[in-house]
Image (cartoon, helix red, strand yellow):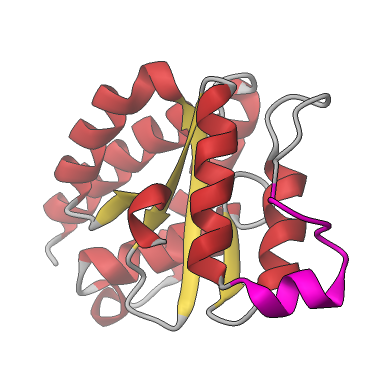
Amino acid sequence: MHNQDIEYWAEQARHLLELINPADPERAEAQHETFLSELAVRDEDELDSTVALMHTLQEVIVGEASFQASWRGKAELIEALEALLPEPELRIDWGGDSEDEDFLAAVTVPQLLRRAFLSLQDAGYTLWCWNSESDSYVGWISRSVDETQLVEVYYGLGLDVRLAEDLG
């Protein structure tokens, strides 16, 4: 990618961060600054695609504004999503005891993502998943009222992002 493309992408990433950190604009700005710092130390050939840029951004925000779980990481997914809940009293209805081994053995990660999507949707939030071109599930939570803006940002970033309900 050319520097001009990377600058445009970085500006679009700012909008993404603002939308997935709606209650904490200072955190969104700090994440964006960290992202820009990461871009500055990377070789240009490392930043040759939107997927490479998004992986760089994901490294900055995972655990704070996004989740990542392996395709078999059911407990990992549950823990990561519960850590991202935007309201302290908000809970996800997993459809069973999320700590029970029999329950975890009976569900798949896509099924858990769909259940989390439906549960969050009822509370006014949307769960998104990005096609990271890896064997991990990656995504974030946003306010449902921001869905249209987010779709525009995804288009501007050139990302393949879907509603988590479409995965399970």
- In depth, the one of 46 and 131 nearer the eye is 131
Q: Which residue is drawn at 46% across and 69% down?
A: 41
- Classify the position of the N terminus by image quarter: bottom left
Q: Is residue 38 visible?
A: no
- The mark tally for this picture is 0
- In depth, the one of 23 and 165 nearer the eye is 165
Q: Is residue 32 covered in magenta?
A: no
Q: Position of residue 72 (x, y in %)?
A: 60, 82
For this view, does 140 lie left or right of residue 146? right
Q: Can residue 111 be seen in this view?
A: yes
The region drawn magenta spans 94-107
| 29 over 80 or under it: above or below | above
Residue 109's quadrant in the figure?
bottom right
Q: Which residue is drawn at 55% across and 64% down?
A: 59
Q: Position of residue 123 (x, y in %)?
A: 59, 22
Q: Where is residue 87 in the image (x, y as percent from the top left)?
A: 74, 24
Q: Residue at x 69, y 51 (%)?
A: 95
For this view, does 23 lie left or right of residue 42? right
| 133 over 36 or under it: above or below | below
Q: Which residue is drawn at 52% across and 20% down?
A: 124
| 44 over 99 or under it: above or below | below
Q: Position of residue 44 (x, y in %)?
A: 26, 74
- Classify the position of the C terminus by image quarter: bottom left
Residue 24's quadrant in the figure?
top right
